[in-house]
Every structure is written in C-alpha cells, then in structure tokens.
Image: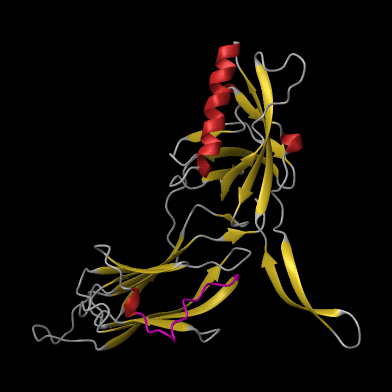
C-alpha cells in the first residue's frame, strides 16, 4: 500500500510581546516576557509598560549545572559514572516606576502577585520566555522564590523602586515553544480489486530517522489514529520499544476503529483514549520502555497491525536546550 509522509510540520510563528531587544548576560540581545499562571503576558523589556529589566543584574541563563557521580580508579583519578542535571535559579532584576506614588504601588502589587501566584496550590508555574531578533524563542517554567522586597534606598519607593527576583526552575532546560511533528499515514488509494474488500493485517507506516535538534533528550507524545489492532514503536538505535493493545483486558475496547484516536505520553507515562479513558494498562508491561529521543539522529519505526486507509501516527516533541 503506498504511503505519503510529511516529516516535519511546524505551526506559523507568532510574534513575541513588544519590547526593544536588550543585551542580556550569557545570551546577547533579546526581548523577554513572563506569562503568569492565569495566562496573562507581562513584557519585561518594554520601558513603556512601566517596568523594565535591569539587564546588568540578570544571571542564570547559561548552561545547566550538574552533580557528578564518579568511581575512584585503582591507579588514581576517577571515572564519571553519572551526571545529574540540577534545578536552575534565575536572578532577574526589575525596575518599576509610576507617574505617581499610587501608580507605582499598583504596578508593584500587580507584578508581585503575578510572580508569587506560582506558589499557590493548583496554580502551577509561570513561564519566562526569551525571544531573539530573528523570531526564535526559548521558554522555561519558573516559580517565585524571593526578591520582591524593594531596595529601600533614599528617595526610592515614592515613584520608582527595583526588585531583584530569584526564580526557581525545577526543570533546568529551556524549551522551544514551536513543536516538531513527524507524521505517517496510510494512503487512501483504492486497490484495483475494488469493489472486492481488501484488508492489511500489518503495516510499517514509517521507518525513518527523527532528528532532535536540541541539547538533551526529549520525551515525545504520540497520537495514533485508527484503524489499528496493535501499535508498536521501536527505537532501532537502542532496541527499546513499547506496544499498545486496545483489546487488552485492562482496556477492553477492542480494535481502534477508523478515526478513533489514542494519545501516548512518555514523560510522565500516560495513555489516554479520545474520551479521556485511561489506557495505560494496554501497554505491554513489564517489557514497555517509553523511550526518548537523544540529541541528533534517532532511527525510529512506527508499526500498526490491522491498519488501513486513514491509519496515522503523529510523533510530537519540543526540543530542549542548555541555554536561553
């Protein structure tokens, strides 16, 4: 059965919040914005907003820090056994001003609330985004740690003040907000035996090389569209694989029918049918290995049993980077 493929699909670029690029330590000229847990975007390099980043005090945008575990060697020295990425702390100074004391107070309170609400139960992290002049962007999730105290300098606090924020990042890597997608789909062309029915018992929708342009492993999401009776994804480079059986006793659905979809997330492990039902029991435990994509080229195979016209697989991931 013929196949058509579209290796990478990216949505149109969106413009970052307004602002003048400023020189930021460790990364060069860029604009910055913060999105609070409610979804409101706060520009951080736009003087007209009433607050502005004091770029000279910014830090924590460089490469990830690692804890190294080593084994002593009998002839001296040591051998690296493991490198563990550590949480990141970003220091971000803000200068806040107002035409009047009350305007300053209102802006100060609003910004303080936007950052500190990341610590409220159920709110979740905020997002710090760095945008380059060429339109590329990188993001990182942040939690407020401290710093919204003001500088307590003579004359400050009347119509201007500054805060030196410490933002804690549980995942120290920066993420590209533009997803990369690898799509494989069975063609819908008809057999010359039509009108007699034809059935494909098994089909490899794609044996391909997926390139991760980032600096570290990413954990992709898979969206499978039926028909399919057994779904198997294999990383040919490492030998790791996992299978999902929609007819498994823990699922009890039966074959995935045409147009039905199931989503498989690799970190944290999650399998959801289109109505939200939990299908994680359909994985081939304990042999399942929900593998990630290493930086560079990854040989990958998508295989569906019981596939037919309309069967499709989408592998989606966002590259992760050491620096902003």
Please give left or right for residue 192 compared with residue 145 in the image. Answer: left
Could you tell me residue 204's position as x and y percent?
A: 36, 84
Q: Is residue 209 above or below residue 137?
A: below
Q: Tell me the residue at 60%/28% (across/down).
A: 46
Instruction: Identify which residue, 234 or 1, lies in the foreground.
Output: 234
Q: Is residue 232 above or below residue 107?
A: below
Q: Which residues are magenta?
A: 283-295
Spot the residue most to the right.
75
Can residue 18 be seen? no
Q: Quadrant of the N terminus?
A: bottom left
Q: Tell me the residue at 27%/63% (across/down).
A: 276
Spot the residue most to the left.
195
Q: Quadrant of residue 282?
A: bottom left
Could you tell me residue 225's position as x and y percent?
A: 28, 70
Q: Tell me the residue at 71%/56% (across/down).
A: 63
Please give left or right for residue 135 compared with residue 279 in the image. Answer: right
Q: Is residue 141 above or below residue 40?
A: below
Could you tell me residue 75's position as x and y percent?
A: 91, 87
Instruction: Identify which residue, 322 or 23, lies in the foreground.
Output: 322
In the image, is residue 316 part of the stretch drawn in magenta? no
Can residue 271 be seen? yes
Q: Tell me the residue at 53%/20% (across/down).
A: 106
Q: Is residue 97 above or below residue 236?
A: above
Q: Quadrant of residue 224?
A: bottom left
């Amino acid at each position: 059965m013929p196949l058509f493929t579209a290796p990478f699909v990216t949505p149109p670029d969106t413009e970052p919040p307004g602002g003048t690029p400023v020189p930021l330590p460790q990364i060069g000229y860029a604009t910055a914005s913060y999105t609070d847990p409610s979804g409101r975007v706060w520009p951080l390099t736009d003087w007209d907003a009433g607050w502005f980043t004091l770029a000279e005090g910014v830090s924590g945008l460089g490469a990830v820090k690692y804890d190294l575990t080593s084994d002593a060697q009998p002839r001296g020295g040591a051998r690296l056994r493991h490198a563990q990425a550590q949480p990141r702390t970003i220091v971000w100074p803000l200068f806040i001003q107002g035409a009047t004391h009350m305007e300053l107070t209102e802006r100060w309170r609003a910004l303080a609330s936007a950052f500190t609400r990341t610590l409220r139960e159920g709110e979740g992290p905020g997002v710090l985004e760095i945008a380059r002049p060429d339109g590329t962007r990188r993001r990182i999730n942040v939690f407020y740690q401290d710093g919204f105290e003001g500088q307590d300098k003579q004359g400050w606090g009347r119509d201007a003040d500054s805060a030196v924020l410490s933002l804690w990042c549980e995942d120290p890597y920066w993420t590209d907000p533009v997803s990369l997608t690898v799509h494989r789909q069975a063609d819908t062309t008809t057999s010359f035996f039509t009108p007699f029915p034809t059935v494909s018992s098994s089909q490899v929708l794609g044996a391909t090389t997926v390139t991760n342009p980032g600096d570290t492993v990413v954990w992709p999401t898979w969206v499978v569209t039926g028909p399919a009776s057994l779904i198997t994804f294999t990383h040919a480079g490492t030998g790791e694989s996992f299978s999902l059986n929609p007819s498994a006793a823990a699922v009890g659905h039966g074959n995935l029918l045409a147009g039905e979809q199931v989503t498989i997330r690799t970190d944290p492990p999650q399998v959801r049918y289109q109505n939200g039902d939990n299908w994680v029991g359909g994985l081939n435990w304990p042999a399942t290995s929900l593998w990630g994509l290493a930086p560079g080229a990854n040989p990958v195979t998508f295989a569906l049993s019981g596939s037919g016209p309309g069967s499709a697989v989408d592998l989606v991931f966002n590259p992760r980077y050491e620096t902003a």
